[in-house]
Image (cartoon, rainbow, N blue to C red):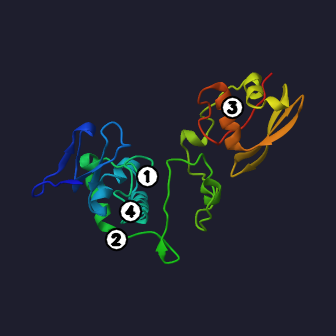
Amino acid sequence: MVRIVPTNDGVLFYVNKARPYEGEFRIYPNPNSIPSGLDLINVLPIEKYLRGVVPAEMSPSWPEEALKAQILAARTYALVRIKDENIFDVYDTTLSQVYKGISIADPKIDQLIESTKGEVVTYGGKLADTVYSASAGGYTVDSSFAWKKDVPYLKGKPDPYDTSKYATYWWNVSISKSQIEKAYPQIGAVLNVEITKKMFERPIEIKITGTKGIITVGNDDFRKAIEDAAGQKLFASEYFDIVIQN
């Protein structure tokens, strides 16, 4: 491991991303890391880390109370994931939280980070897992639906405040009968495709009727089979309806 530490109050600059960073850099060998075979880790205090997260996840122009909620969610999310045995705890992308160093630091958010310093979200006396997303399509889901793990405070419910494009009919795709027949040859010629069961407004059971029989498949299986048959990515999300066209 190699450490790169700035002098005095200086910052570090990562040329590949053209961004300055606080804290220090640590470089670890990783033969699976492409293209360099190295992992570059930014190590810094949690409150400084938030300076590069919150403005990336929420516009500083939004109301202060919303920004405070985002700060607490981001702080708690990161703290839950700190593990001593790991060389790093979170990614700088949507795999964890978007983090862009101090290039996006904002005075308003800096002040709110300071005013909420140390505040976290808890459940049952422990840190809560404050997962979040830009949009849930207008309806969130239970943790057991998303990750096969029951978390008592992560329950699905309608989100009437979601006005993003993801909460409306923002994508569509045409699937041919031949693609369905290629995906499920055991049914013969396709006669009908319908969603027979939903949960949190998402299809979880799809019935395909053909000249040789009927099969019922799950959402993941249906999307994968159709995309494999088409040889390309077709579905923009797991949240969709099916409309039969003549």
Q: Is residue 177 left or right of residue 99?
A: right
* Among the two numbered marks 3 and 4 on one chain, the one whose residue lies closer to the N terminus: 4
Foreground of the two, 200 or 127: 127
Foreground of the two, 149 or 143: 149
The answer, for residue 58, to whether it is visible in the render is no
Whole-percent x, y for residue 208 in the image: 82, 35
Amino acid beneath label 1: Ser
In whole angstroms, how far apart are the C-alphas of marks 3 and 1?
29 Å
Amino acid beneath label 2: Gly
In whole angstroms, how far apart are the C-alphas of marks 2 and 3?
48 Å
Give the residue pinned by disc 4.
75
Whole-percent x, y for residue 43 in the image: 27, 57
Vertical placement of 84 versus 208: above or below?
below
Whole-percent x, y for residue 71 in the image: 38, 60
* Among the two numbered marks 1 and 2 on one chain, the one whose residue lies closer to the N terminus: 1
Q: Which mark is residue 226?
A: 3
Give the residue pinned by disc 2.
118
Q: Which mark is residue 45?
A: none
In whole angstroms, how far apart are the C-alphas of marks 4 and 2?
8 Å
Amino acid beneath label 4: Arg
Q: Which mark is residue 96?
A: 1
Q: Are marks 1 and 2 in contact (CB under 8 Å)?
A: no
Q: Are marks 2 and 3 in contact (CB under 8 Å)?
A: no
Which of the 4 image quadrants contains residue 48? bottom left
Label 3 Cα neighbours within 10 Å, binned few <14 / some 14-19 / many ≥20: many
